[in-house]
Amino acid sequence: MAADPSVKTKVIVICGPTGIGKTELSLSLAEYFHGGIISADSMQVYRYMDIGTAKPYASERRRVPHFMIDVADPDEPYDAARYAEEAGEWIAALDRRKMVPFVVGGTGLYIKALAHGLCGANPSSPEIRERLRREAEIKGHRFLYERLVANDPEAAQRIHPNDSYRIIRALEVHESSGRPMSACQKAHGFADAPFDVLKICLNIERQALYERINRRVEQMAAAGLLGEVKSLLKMGYSAELKPMKAIGYRHMVDFIEGRIGWEATIDLMKRDTRRYAKRQLIWFKKDPAMVWMAPDDFYGTCSRIEDFLRRLPEGPAGGRG
């Protein structure tokens, strides 16, 4: 980490909704500040999933070193805790090289886990998780949700009854630790802040963002997303895997299996991507420490970063939100 172990490493987060222009701006910023880019995208961690995850091109990776891309196979379990650990190691490596770490992406939970730490009492148990998944298939998600209401009503209030992933995760934590997940999170408070972080979120007028998203979907289709999904299926990766349920991939699977026509596939992919972008913005707007910038405001963003880097480094007691 930093030369003085009591001083927190400075980290710049560039986040925002999908299609906003994070890649282009972060490349310019990382070049200007002699930095490296650590992806904060929960889909870019997977190998063989390139087009649908909008991974940086090889030419862009040559411009600036990139990390946390292609670190897991599509059928390999991957979560925010693993991300925070591995991304934190790359931040330390960049700091040792006297390079500025830029964390770039739109997965809010990954950014939160990295910037604030995760509850250590939230263990992961693949065996319990798989048993709960089978139980959900047999008895339905509502059955598990009612169990969560009984065991952890506070967590149940924050989780939609149809959000099977979070329901199973909360029950998994309860069974693994013997404590409700809400109690663990309340005690921890995401308060371990291992880094001194400047969080910049990009945003533009809603309609302009939606037009960008629509163009991106069309570009992904033209670039061969359908062929990428066919290749993944041919490699033996099940359409039921979590990454294959992501936007774009599940749409192409529906088309391949004849459940929907091509034009409807593209229209649904556009719609669902717009809805995802809206959810991302809602997440980021909850963070009072977020600095909001336009994606084309390079000089304004540079000024913010320069002020942050010039500021005296924080010690262990002065963590930022």
Image (cartoon, rainbow, N blue to C red):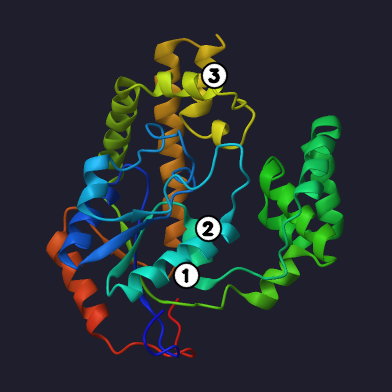
Crowd tier of the residue under label 3, counting other residues whose Cα lies within 10 Å: few below 14, some 14–19, many 20 or above: few
Marks 1 & 3, CB-CB < 8 Å contact: no
Which amino acid does the dot numbered 3 rest on? Lys
Q: Position of residue 31 (x, y in %)?
A: 18, 60
> Residue farthest to the left?
299
Type of residue at label 1? Ala
Discs 3, 2 touching: Cβ within 8 Å? no
Q: At x 16% / y 72%, what residue is drawn? A: 303
Image location (x, y in percent) of residue 154: 74, 63
Residue that numbered label 3 is attached to: 234
Residue at 47%, 70% in the rendered image: 115
Q: Can residue 64 be seen in this view?
A: yes
Q: Is residue 295 visible?
A: no
Asked if residue 219 is positioned above or below residue 167 in the image, the reply reads above
Q: In this view, does 162 lie above or below 297?
A: above
Label 3: which secondary element: helix
Q: How far apart are marks 3 and 2 (CA)?
A: 28 Å
Which residue is at a point 44% across and 15% down the rendered structure image?
264
Amino acid type, mark 2? Tyr
Residue, disc 2: 83
Which comes sooner in the sequence, label 1 or label 2?
2
Tell me the residue that label 1 is attached to: 115
Residue 214, percent across and down?
Answer: 31, 30
Q: Is residue 177 left or right of residue 164?
A: right
* Helix, strand or loop under label 1: helix
Instruction: Estimate the spatial distance between the alpha carbons at disc 1 and disc 2, rounded to whole Å.
Output: 11 Å
Distance between the Cα atoms at labels 1 and 3?
38 Å
Cβ–Cβ under 8 Å for marks 1 and 2:
no
Taking 155 as reference, is 32 left or right? left
Q: Few, some or many C-alpha atoms within 10 Å of disc 1 (few <14, some 14-19, many ≥20)?
A: many
Q: Earlier in the sequence, mark 3 or mark 2?
A: 2
Image quarter hosting the N terminus: bottom left
